[in-house]
Amino acid sequence: MSREGATHEGAGPVRGRRLPARLLVPALAGVLAAGCADVEGLGNGGDQGTVRAPQTLWKDIRPAPPEPGQLPGTAAVVPGVTSPDGTLRGVDPLDVVRADITAAGAQDGGTGQLVDPRAKERIARCTQAVDGGPDCPVRPRVLHDLTGDGKEELITALDLDGRLSELRVYTARDDGSIVRVLSRRAVLEGVEVAAEHLAVREPSSNPEYVAVADYVWNPDTGTMNLEQLTLDDCRSLPGAPLTADRQQCAH
């Protein structure tokens, strides 16, 4: 498979519904259980049951704070690779991913905080062939402007075990440095770009839905930040019939 993937045009907006506000429902139920107002047509619905406040589990146990630099959402300059013209079109994506994986693994000491420990072994399977060879786990590059500055970002992923992948997004600065602006370890059921949005579709605990994480550029942090998390009842399946909004759904 060729790494020289064509630039993707923007797709339509991601359709979905917001995650249920679980804490809002008990509060609303409490109001209703307290009785109805004296309005014609409304009556007492009877005992609605006892409404209890949410119970906090393990409230005395807190995770240790992350070590400096060990935040996956932090922008990081990729050492050892540069872009002479300040763009990513002429840069070898394999060189970028290899340098990033090596640096991230050294920084987190193999803990998996910044990169899966298996990634270094997996990328070692890539050869000097144009497409990295048949065993190379790095996906074909996608070039798409996610920052709105008119220059394309590099979007790619390294497949770890046939299910999990390391999603990576890079941008090039005017000084020639290449910066990782998003890293995400996920089951990539689908990845979509639309204008300046990057949507990552993952399986949820309910087989009827997929979780959709929508990332947008944040100029203050210099990273792709999570803007919205939704549930979508359309599971993208190759070969499935197109729906009215041109998505391939399982139903």
Image (cartoon, rainbow, N blue to C red):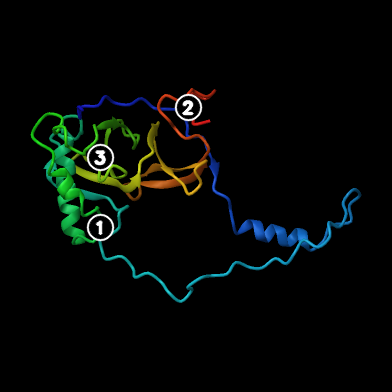
Element marked by disc 3: strand
Give the residue number, with chain letter if any, for mark 3.
Answer: 171
Q: Earlier in the sequence, mark 3 or mark 1?
A: 1
The residue nearer to you, when weighing 103 against 206, is 206
Element marked by disc 1: loop
| Residue most extreme to the left | 128
Q: Earlier in the sequence, mark 2 or mark 1?
A: 1
Q: Rate crowding at label 2 as few (under 14), some (14 to 19) or many (20 or more) other CA atoms within 10 Å.
A: some
Q: Is residue 38 left or right of residue 118?
A: right
Residue under the image location 50 percent in, 34 percent down:
234
The quadrant in which residue 30 appears is bottom right
Q: Is residue 78 visible?
A: no
Q: Picture coordinates of residue 179 (x, y %)?
A: 22, 45
Q: Is residue 47 visible?
A: yes
Mark 3 vs mark 1, foreground winner is 1
In this rendering, is residue 55 above or below 38? below
Give the residue number, with chain letter if any, for mark 2.
Answer: 247
Disc ID at residue 112: 1
Which image quarter holds the N terminus? Answer: top left
Q: Picture coordinates of residue 182 (x, y %)?
A: 31, 46
- What separation in Å lies between label 3 and label 2 (alpha carbons)? 29 Å
Q: Is residue 11 left or right of residue 52?
A: left
Q: Is residue 232 left or right of residue 51?
A: left
- What separation in Å lies between label 3 and label 1 (alpha carbons)? 23 Å
In this rendering, is residue 87 above or below 81? above
Element marked by disc 2: loop
Disc ID at residue 25: none
